[in-house]
Image: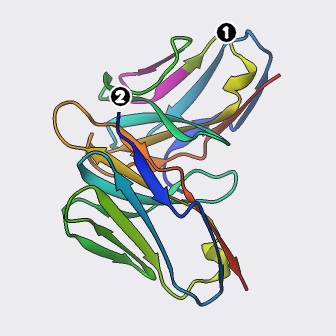
Amino acid sequence: GQQLNQSPQSMFIQEGEDVSMNCTSSSIFNTWLWYKQDPGEGPVLLIALYKAGELTSNGRLTAQFGITRKDSFLNISASIPSDVGIYFCAGRATGGSNYKLTFGKGTLLTVNP
Amino acid sequence: DSGVTQTPKHLITATGQRVTLRCSPRSGDLSVYWYQQSLDQGLQFLIQYYNGEERAKGNILERFSAQQFPDLHSELNLSSLELGDSALYFCASSALTESEAFFGQGTRLTVV
């Protein structure tokens, strides 16, 4: 089955620092999505990517769909305390009737003020 | 607010019982997904429906079943509940099978 490796598992950073996390897949994906989840809440969609090489920004967040279609990264610039949470990547494979969205295990981000 | 509504928010039940979780997708969305999230397993895909038909299946136990109704709301039925079924259950919806998915707030199920 599809495997998504998300790294790092956790990060502890100072406010104002930039953050980078990434996901790699054993399969080719045609969609990459990045979500943030706060404790006890549902994941909130941050960025959606649909084309290999695509680079998309949402405020201080930037994500890219890797050229090989097997990876994606998310960068957060100038982190602030409210960036704390768990960040998930999710990918959807190509072809056939395979529509399921597979999630990475998440990156727990802690921001020290 | 994502526009996806899940009820109930919390559910406590005993082992062996059966429960039904309900999801109303965003207005206009045809596709509904169900996920289970436990501490050590992350977000595990259970099943996806599109316009009333099953489109993709994950590692959903035989004790679990789901359906999507003509009005597009969906229900996840969990039966013969075990302690290990305690988890957060999320529903997500998308306009099409391949577009971005938006999550509800989840149902926290506790089996005692």
Q: Which is closer to the viewer, label 2 or label 1? A: 1
C-alpha span from label 2 to label 1: 23 Å
Between A108 and B72, the residue placed more toward the observer is A108
Residue A16 lies in the magenta stretch: no
Residue A98 in the figure: left or right of residue A5: left
What percent of the width, then of the height, locates residue A71? 31, 60
Which residues are drawn in magenta? B65-76
Q: Is residue B104 visible?
A: yes
| Mark 1 Cα-neighbour bin, 10 Å: few <14, some 14–19, many ≥20 | few
Between B111 and B3, the residue placed more toward the observer is B111
Between B24 and B17, the residue placed more toward the observer is B17
Q: Chain of mark 1?
A: B
Q: Secondary structure at mark 2?
A: strand
Same chain assignment for discs 2 and 1? yes
Q: Label 1 amino acid? A: Ser
Where, quadrant-wise, is the C terminus of chain A in this rendering?
Answer: bottom right
Q: Residue at x 60, y 74 (%)?
A: A83
Q: Label 2 amino acid? A: Tyr
Q: Which residue is mark 2?
A: B49
Give the vertical position of A34 relative to A113 (above or below).
above
Residue A13 in the figure: left or right of residue B60: right
Q: Residue at x 67, y 79 (%)?
A: A81
What percent of the width, then of the height, locates residue B67? 43, 19
Q: Chain of mark 2?
A: B
Q: Which residue is mark 1?
A: B80
What percent of the width, then of the height, locates residue B33? 42, 35
What percent of the width, then of the height, locates residue B42? 57, 44
